Image (spheres, helix red, strand yellow):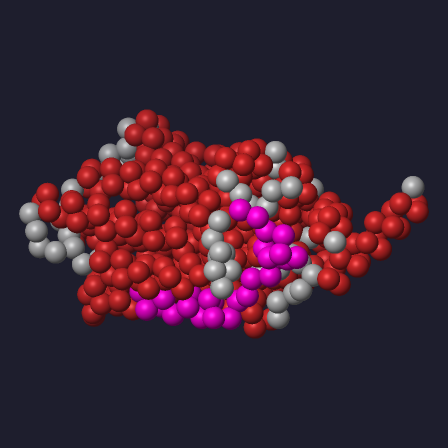
Amino acid sequence: MLAKQLKQDLLSTKVRTQVEKPGQKEMWTYGLGSFGIFTVWTLIGAFLTYYYTDVAGIGAATVGTLMLVSRLFDGVTDFGMGAIVDVTKSKHGKARPWLLWMSFPLAITTILLFSVPNLSDTGKIVYAYATYLLFILLYTAVSIPYKTLLGVMTQDQNSRSTANVYAGIFIMTGTLVVMTLTQPLVAKIGWTMLAVIYGVITFASLYVTFLVVKERSSSYGDHAEKVSAKEGFKALTKNKYWVMITGYCLIFYATTALTQGAALYYSQYILGNIGYFPFYGLAVSVPMLIGMFFLTPLVKRYGKRNMAVVGAIIYVVAQSLKLIDPTNVVLFLGGSGLAGIGAIPPIALLFAMINDTVEYGEYKTGVRTEGLVNSGASFGIKVGTGLGLALIGWLLGFGGYVGGAAEQTGLTLQMILALNIYIPIALGVLQLVIMLMFKLDKEYPTVLAELQRRKR
């Protein structure tokens, strides 16, 4: 038994010396792509509905239907794009070329979204549907290859984790930029010129990522073969860690959408002042951004899964603190800040964990599907986000919420508490349970060693 273990350890060490690792510059440049992708996504998520209803003059119910249709369309395009990436062959690889081909059209479509012409009501609706669905299509054509790129730039776990942490830093930076600067800039230059600025940022950051980041693992040993969509989907169902991480994506992003979207109601009706909401944003975002810089050495020492377990525990404890006095502003902001710290590991490490399941899937089935693995997990992210936002509407409606009212019914207040505290605690516990079952970090060296053995 001891001899067998020593043999495995020696083989794992040999494999690690064979895995090419990206340098610090390349990993930071990979992260830069997140700045472009998530800056424009935050702009869309935070301000497009307002632009449609209050600037373009499109009815709120119509906008709501548009957002629902787009979510469904978005999920379908994720799987389609994942299958396309897996069969893409070019001199730039399978994922990188899509950043080159689609980043500029994405930037142009972003500008079109915030340039609704002065048409009839029907004309505006048609324009909004056409441009937003086109944006979703182009965004998917960039985001799925970008996520896949993390898996094919290296097979080294630590490098993937580090690059993902750098991406997390850029994600939080982009979120802060959009949330703090958008409204002041709009007042000075208008929505269309603002969209031009963000479009340029998106194109430039993705183009630099394309130029610097290289693909390595997908072509290792020239063994890559085309995989049919049917074969790829069948392989996914046999990848237990992909199933776990996709479920985790759904739950984590449902939690995120729920707490971000419901905090405004909490500020107004539980704390009694809607002006507390910006402080909520700062309380969550600033500790997360600072914490990103300290995560890499912890991941190297304890592993991604263990950090995610600790994060889930911190999140549950942080949300539970609010139960001491739900109307206390300090407890609410402090608990939210601590919850933000608990969310650092999944935000910074999730895509690295997703891409680690690529090797496990190949190990179990012999089929390597970076694109489908990432598109499937991305589908979970988007379904989770939609579910979180839907829960807000459903529970507020159940409670008899009246928009704009100075006071709400007791049942409505209970629903607001449930959305902000009770349900997030339950979802945090589910995250913890899944991560306790997710043991791929421990198995990964053996998996990679076996894959390398098969290719010799």
- Residue 381 visible in image: no
| Residue 186, placed above or below residue 63 | below
Residue found at x 37% / y 61% = 101
Of 71 and 389, nearer the camera is 71
- Quadrant, the C terminus: bottom right
Q: Decide if residue 211 is on the left or right side of residue 394.
A: right
Check residue 241 for magenta coloring. no
**Range drawn in magenta:** 199-226
Task: Name the residue furthest bottom.
Answer: 25
| Residue 292, placed above or below residue 77 | below
Q: Decide if residue 271 is on the left or right side of residue 109.
A: right
Residue 59, image x, y percentages = 16, 42
Of 285 and 81, nearer the camera is 81
- Quadrant, the N terminus: top right
The quarter of the displayed image where residue 70 is located: top left
Residue found at x 34% / y 30% = 394
Of 251 and 455, nearer the camera is 455
Residue found at x 51% / y 71% = 212
Residue 426, image x, y percentages = 53, 34
Check residue 224 for magenta coloring. yes
Residue 276, image x, y percentages = 36, 53
Of 428 and 70, nearer the camera is 70
Q: Decide if residue 408 is on the left or right side of residue 218.
A: left
